Image (cartoon, rainbow, N blue to C red):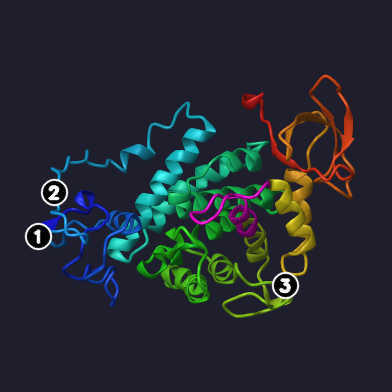
Amino acid sequence: MKVHPDQLMPGCLLTKDVIGNAIHPLIPRNTVIEPIHIQVLQTFKIQVVDVAPRLVNGDVFHVEKRVQPVEDKKKNEENNQVNWTFYDHYTNAVKVTKSICEDLMRTNRLDIQRVRKLIIPLMKQAVKQPNLFLELYQYGDKQQYIYHHMVSIALLAASLAKKLNYNEGDRLKISLAAYLSDLGMISEQHTIYLQERELTEKEIENIRTHPVLSYRLIEDKSSISKDVKIAVLQHHERMDGSGYPLGVKAEKIHPFAKVIGVIDTYHAMTSERAYREKQSIFNVIEELLQRQAGKLDVPTIEALIQNYLTPQVGTRVKLSNEQIGTVVFVDESYPAHPFVQLEDASEKIINLKEQHLHIEEFLLDHEA
C-alpha cells in the first residue's frame, strides 16, 4: 500500500526500496520504520512510500488521513524584515538554509545567489551583536543541528574575522566559506548525523568525506573565489597534519580555513547533538587551550577567548554548582575561573579555580 511519509508510524515495514538521488536506496525494502526514518523521508521530500498492510508486530496498519500542509512561501519569508530582532533574523536564516538544502538534495544544484542574499545581511547583523557567542549558545535544535550549525558558524566566523582585523571583503569570504563548508553533510549518505548515539568508526570515516563533497558542489562556480573554495576544502585540516582530507600542516592551510576550523570546533562542542548534550562554554575554553592548541591555530583561539569568552567584570553568571554570582575579577591566565561574588546571604567572593568550579553559563540581561 502507498502512503505519504507523514502517515507512517514506527513498526511499518517497507515493501519497496525508497530511491533518492544516489545510486543506492535511501532506505532499502524490508526496513522496519523508526522515527529517524520518517524524519529522513520528510527531509528528502519523499512523497510516497510502499509499506505492508500490517505492522511488524502483526497489527493492522490503520492509515490516518493526512492533513495537507500549507504551501511554503519560501521566497516571501526572506522579505519584510524591517524591525526584526537579531533572533528573528537568525531563525529566518535557519528556515531559509533548510529550504536551500532541501532544494540542493532534490536537484543536486546549489542556488549560490540565494546563499549570498542570505549571508551578506546576516554577516552585517553579526558584527553588531556584542553578545553574539553567548546569544547563539542559547539557540539550537538537535534534530535540525546541521542548519543551525551552518548559520551559526557563518555568523561566528564573520564576527571573529573582524576581531582578527580582516577587511570587510575577506570577512564576507570567510563567512561564506564557513556557511558552505558542511554542504557535503546534506546528502543521503550523511543522514547518520541524526543518529541518537555516538557514531561508529565506519560512520565517522564516512562523515570525513564531507569537505571534499562540499568542495565539489562549488568547484565549478565562477562566482565563488578560489580562497573560499580552498577554505571549504581545508576547514578540517589541522596545524600538526592530523586533519583531513589532505593531511596538510600549518604552512599549507589557508588562513580562512584556520579561522573556520576554530569556529567549527567551538560551535560543534557547544551545541546539543542527537547523541549528546551541549558542553559548557567554559569546559570548551579549557578543551581549546589544553587539547586543541597543537591542532588549531593558537592566535585564532586566543582571539576567540579574549574577545568573546572571557567573562567581563560585572557579568552575572551561573556556576556549575547552580549558584548565581557576579564576576568581580578575572585572571587572564585562567579566564574560565574568575573570582565571583555569590548572590546569597553570605555575598562571599570565591576563586573558582580553588573551589573546583566553573561558569556554566552567562546570564544575559533578558535572563536576569
Whole-percent x, y for residue 113 in the image:
40, 54
Q: Which residue is mark 3?
A: 239
Whole-percent x, y for residue 189 in the image:
38, 70
| 142 or 309, nearer to the observer | 142
Crowding at dot 3, Cα within 10 Å, few <14 / some 14-19 / many 20+, comes out as many
Q: Is residue 300 visible?
A: no
Which amino acid type is shown beneath numbered disc 1? Met
Q: Secondary structure at mark 2?
A: loop
Q: Residue at x 66, y 37 (%)?
A: 131
What's the CA distance linking mark 2 and mark 3? 55 Å
Q: Residue at x 42, y 65 (%)?
A: 192
CB within 8 Å, label 2 to label 3: no
Q: Residue at x 38, y 40 (%)?
A: 78
CB within 8 Å, label 1 to label 2: yes
Q: Residue at x 59, y 71 (%)?
A: 234
- Is the magenta region chiefly helix, strand or loop? loop
Highlighted range, magenta: 264-280
Which amino acid type is shown beneath numbered disc 3? Met
Which amino acid type is shown beneath numbered disc 2? Val
Q: Which residue is mark 2?
A: 63
Whole-percent x, y for residue 265 in the image:
63, 59
> Could you tell which of marks 2 and 3 lies nearer the N-terminus?
2
| Residue 290, above or below 316 | below
| 32 or 285, nearer to the observer | 32
> Could you tell which of marks 1 and 2 lies nearer the N-terminus?
1
Q: Secondary structure at mark 3?
A: loop
Q: Is residue 152 left or right of residue 79?
A: right
Residue 195 drawn in magenta = no
| 172 or 288, nearer to the observer | 288
Q: Which residue is mark 1?
A: 1
Outermost residue toward the front?
58
What's the CA distance linking mark 1 and mark 2? 10 Å
